[in-house]
Image: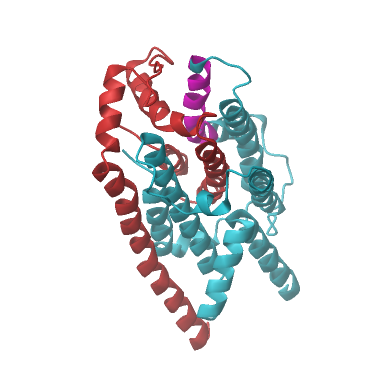
Chain colours: A red, B cyan
Amino acid sequence: MSTRHLHETKRNAGIGLLLFPLLFVVASYTLWGLFITNGAFDFMGQRVSQGVLADGGPLRTVYTRIAPIDGFLTNMVFFTHPVATEDFPLGKLFWTNFMAELAPVLAIMVAEEHVSPKRGRFFRSYVLCCAAGCEHWI
Amino acid sequence: MCAGALVVPVYFLTRLLAPATSHVRLHDSTRATTTVSALLPGFIFGYIIPLVLACCPFGQSSFQHQFWIGFLQMFPALIPISQFLSEVVIRTVGVPSGAQPDPSNKQLNRLYFFTAGVSALVHLYITWVVVFDDSLTLYQFYIPSFHRQDFAGCVLVFLQFDYAIVMASACLAVALESGPRSSIELVSKFVIGLVIGPGAMLGFQKMKKDGMRAASS
């Protein structure tokens, strides 16, 4: 490996080491910081406990009859429902775009983990996919 | 609670910190084949179909609509499960005798280009809708707005930031993996990744590497 190539590799790694944590910090604030400070988080908790959607309609609470999974899905559906209805066309369009664009990123991560020679890749990719793909876990 | 934008940068950071595994992985044609054969059914049945049903209720009741939204949320779990089951089936049936490692990994490249195709179709659909709907603009679509104070507006802002950070992380990772020789090259590859999608960018990079490998051998 030439000196120049080594220098480029180190510089690229340095850029990654700087920018990925920065993106994580930005994500922490712009997602959860804003969602909590604007009151949406509390609103969500109140409405889910009352069994109603954000628009006042009935919220589905039974999916599998397994309580932990149903609780998990109820929260996810409450969160996603406002942007998956005709009442909010911009939200629905963006949600479609979001899910379709997220899929390639997940596919890349799963494929790369799948062909990784390390043991236990199935569990790693499983946890990774669940964590990255599910929009909210309560 | 968790979100993709928190996980994806950390994931790529861990890959950056442990690069030793990243160059061994693409030389097993059997694994590459199983990746494609396992992921494609998972994507089609676990992702595309629920997405269509969740987005196009076709006159379903609110409860049925909510069921498909909930089912769609489970798709990340369905992909590795289908991948695992497919591996079990292939292992049980047996790998074809005489299978040779395929350094070109065309199967894996096909998967990446498939993901790029999904992105391209969605982009075309969105462009179509925005162009023909006077009430929507690309500015509203991509730039978070804090004017809406209702819950739907908050969710949209959440998703817009989530989308931006996931895409930026993936495109940065792909641009860094290509080994750019200058900052300008890094930025240009990052921008190209955003435009054509990280899947297509990765596929092109791997094709380029295959070409260089073939030329040197």
Q: Nearer the viewer, residue B35 or B189?
A: B189
- Residue with the most extreme front position: B134
Residue A37, given in percent of the width and then of the height, sits at: 24, 45
- Residue with the most extreme top position: A65
- Residue with the most extreme bottom position: A3
Q: Which image quadrant: the C terminus of chain B?
A: bottom right
Residue B74, given in percent of the width and then of the height, sits at: 47, 29
Is B117 situated left or right of A58 in this image? right
Residue name at image x 56 percent, y 56 percent: B25
Residue A4, given in percent of the width and then of the height, sits at: 51, 87
Is B172 situated left or right of B205 in this image? left
Residue name at image x 38 percent, y 47 percent: B147
Q: Main secondary structure of the magenta part?
A: helix
Magenta part of the chain: B63-80
Residue B177, given in percent of the width and then of the height, sits at: 53, 66
Residue name at image x 65 percent, y 62 percent: B206
Q: Is residue B180 magenta?
A: no
Residue name at image x 24 percent, y 33 percent: A42
Q: Nearer the viewer, residue B37 or B10?
A: B10
Q: Is residue A116 visible?
A: no
Is A29 situated left or right of A77 in this image? left
Which quarter of the figure has residue B185? bottom right
Please tell me how many numbered marks the rendered image carries.
Answer: 0
Q: Nearer the viewer, residue B65 or A119?
A: B65
Q: Which image quadrant: the N terminus of chain B?
A: top left
Is A17 situated left or right of B174 in this image? left
Question: Does residue A116 lie above or below A6 as drawn?
Answer: above
Q: Is residue A49 visible?
A: yes
Q: Is residue B68 magenta?
A: yes
